Amino acid sequence: MKQPLPATEAKAKALVNDIRQLIDTSRAQLASAVNSALTLLYWHIGQRIHGEVLKGERAEYGEQIVSTLARQLETDYGRGFSSKNLRHMLRFVEVFPDQEIVSAVRRQLSWTHIKTLIYIDDPLKRDFYLQMCQAERWSTRTLQGRLDSMLFERTALSRQPDELLAIELAALRQQGELTPALVLKDPYILDFLGLQDRYLEKDLEDAILRELENFLLELGAGFTFVARQKRLQIDNEDFYIDLLFYNRRLKRLVAIDLKLGDFKAADKGQMELYLRWLAKHEQEPGEAPPLGIILCSGKKQEQIELLELDQTGIHVAEYLTELPPKALLQQKLHDAITRSRQRLDNRSTGGEA
């Protein structure tokens, strides 16, 4: 038996690869179409149940309808129509009563995404996660991880008054426009670095580069690594930016300065120097001005407020090398959000910050 010629083998291999790609693409499209159809079906079922429940005068009436329906539908169609799932469908309609919104959401998110989102009580918080899921194509696992790490509460966006928060989310929804407030966080959770109690600044930098993929995920949408210890020559002196990134969604360079101790007022001047050098020598036409992130192990809020860093393109944030108990993190973030919103209210009314 003759051995196939090399050229024939190559053609056969290319043909197999082409057909595999066709099959995989068609399967993915079919799965997406099935998910989309099922999601709309679940919304219609929820709407029908919701309409029936509203006719009843007693809360027990709704529970009775769901239980009766579940018994009959499970017999005919299987476990996908259990009482629990019917309640998900009912909740789906209560949270998203507009079919046009549902039609847009079902093309990009799975039913598992939706089941997670509909139980977020705060509408603005829910909208944040919905928009980020769509913009960044988060998997359901990523979405749950972001919720567990309290991503929304850690964004600069959550520090804004509700009306500004709503405007930024609307811009993301309608134009896909991502702003620094949607990207910047405080604190940054760096528990994946595996650092012990005592470490040097170089150890922190080395650990970040070892775990660069996880660090990029924690930084958020659109970040790309550019350089470590970026050298700047100013008046025959050498200065070094610890880490330099580019954010394609924000269209700007982002310089990160690592500090082991608390933030100091002098750190602002150093970062301003870096940003002005980058704007002069590295910023390309059409790009936004560079941003600076000063990552420190602690900070004093009054210093940061007096320096008005939020108006200079410099973001000061703490980093945590261990994830604290959730209750402690919740309280810390709640206090920070309340303090920031009060300061903004005072500023807008002309009171003291």
Image (tube, rainbow, N blue to C red):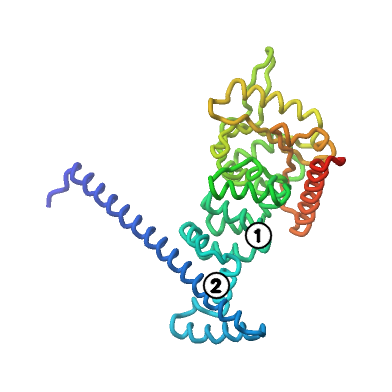
Q: Residue at x 52, y 77 (%)?
A: 48
Query: Of the residues shown, which amino acid type is indicated by label 2?
Result: Met
Disc number for residue 246: none
In the rendered image, is residue 262 in sight? Answer: no
Task: Kindly indicate the quadrant of the structure image that contains residue 330.
Answer: bottom right
Local secondary structure at mark 1: helix
Residue 224: where, in percent of width, then height?
55, 37
> Residue 221: x, y in percent?
57, 44
Furthest residue toward top: 236
Between residues 26 and 50, which one lies in front from this camera angle?
50
Alpha carbon separation for disc pair 2 and 1: 18 Å
Q: Horizontally, is 276 left or right of 30 in the view?
A: right
Does residue 264 lie above or below 69 as drawn? above
State whether residue 99 is above or below residue 201. below
Along the polypeptide, which appears first: circle 2 or circle 1?
2
Image quadrant holding the C terminus, namely top right
Q: Mark 2 = which residue?
A: 89
Which type of secondary structure does the marked residue at label 2 adopt? Answer: helix
Q: Nearer the viewer, residue 168 or 308?
A: 168
Residue 261 in percent (x, y) is at 79, 37
Q: Which residue is mark 1?
A: 123
| Residue farthest right in this picture | 352
How far across and down, in percent of the image, does residue 158 sit? 70, 50
Label 1 neighbour load within 10 Å: few <14, some 14-19, many 20+: few
